[in-house]
Image (cartoon, rainbow, N blue to C red):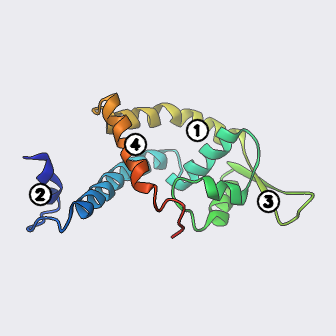
């Protein structure tokens, strides 16, 4: 099967795509969805959702408490209910909140040792899944894919919604 017709066949689409833009964006959505399903399954084994993993990854990477709004700005995908997400992490013993002394409106979130351990346990499986999903691409192909995706996001990446 020709690579150009693969998505059309997967979707059992009878007519060609209306444009190359449509085909590219549907390919991007399909690829992202299939990767997301696999990551969701992996995180579920550790009692996490992808959004919870993302927040914990941000906190571990920063190495210090962060304000809730800062965490929301750094997430890979938009998290509309960041407060509820942090509530759930706190109830699970994976995060704690502390109100800022100087500005009571600001709430800082800290990762707990329990969450650091869960992330350490996940590091290997996450790396393996990255390799399983994209390891068949050469380094040059991966660099080109990253370049193209960043270029595609360029005009609208700063827009919200």
Q: Nearer the viewer, mark 1 or mark 2?
A: 2
Q: Which residue is mark 1?
A: 119
**Residue placed most toward the observer, 97 or 91:** 97
Which callout, 4 or 1, points at the residue further toward the start of the chain? 1
Q: Nearer the viewer, mark 4 or mark 1?
A: 4
Q: Which residue is mark 4?
A: 147
Q: Identify which residue is drawn at 25% across, 64% down.
A: 22
**Residue placed most toward the observer, 25 or 66:** 25
Q: Residues within 10 Å of mark 1 (few under 14, many from 20)?
A: some
Classify 104 as above or below 1.
Answer: below
Which callout, 2 or 3, points at the residue further toward the start of the chain? 2
Q: Nearer the viewer, mark 3 or mark 4?
A: 4
Which labelled disc corresponds to residue 110? Answer: none
Q: Is residue 71 left or right of residue 156?
A: right
Q: Which residue is mark 2?
A: 9
Q: CA distance from mark 3 to mark 4?
A: 36 Å
Label 1: state its secondary structure: helix
Label 4: state its secondary structure: helix
Q: CA distance from mark 2 to mark 3?
A: 50 Å
Q: Nearer the viewer, mark 2 or mark 4?
A: 4
Q: Is residue 84 left or right of residue 41?
A: right
Q: Position of residue 37 (x, y in %)?
A: 37, 52
Q: Is residue 123 left or right of residue 15?
A: right
Q: Position of residue 43 (x, y in %)?
A: 48, 47
Which labelled disc corresponds to residue 107? Answer: 3
Label 2: state its secondary structure: helix
């Amino acid at each position: 099967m020709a690579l150009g017709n693969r998505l059309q066949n997967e979707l059992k689409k009878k007519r060609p795509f209306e444009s190359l833009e449509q085909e590219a964006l549907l390919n991007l959505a399909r690829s992202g969805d299939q990767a997301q399903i696999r990551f969701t399954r992996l995180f579920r084994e550790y009692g996490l959702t992808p959004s919870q993993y993302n927040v914990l990854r941000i906190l571990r990477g920063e190495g210090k408490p962060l304000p809730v709004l800062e965490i929301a700005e750094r997430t890979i995908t938009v998290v509309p209910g960041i407060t509820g997400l942090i509530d759930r992490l706190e109830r699970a013993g994976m995060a704690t909140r502390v109100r800022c002394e100087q500005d009571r409106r600001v709430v800082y979130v800290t990762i707990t040792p329990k969450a650091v351990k869960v992330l350490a346990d996940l590091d290997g499986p996450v790396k393996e899944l990255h390799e399983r999903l994209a390891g068949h691409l050469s380094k040059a192909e991966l660099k080109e894919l990253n370049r193209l995706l960043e270029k595609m996001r360029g005009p609208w990446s700063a827009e919200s919604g």
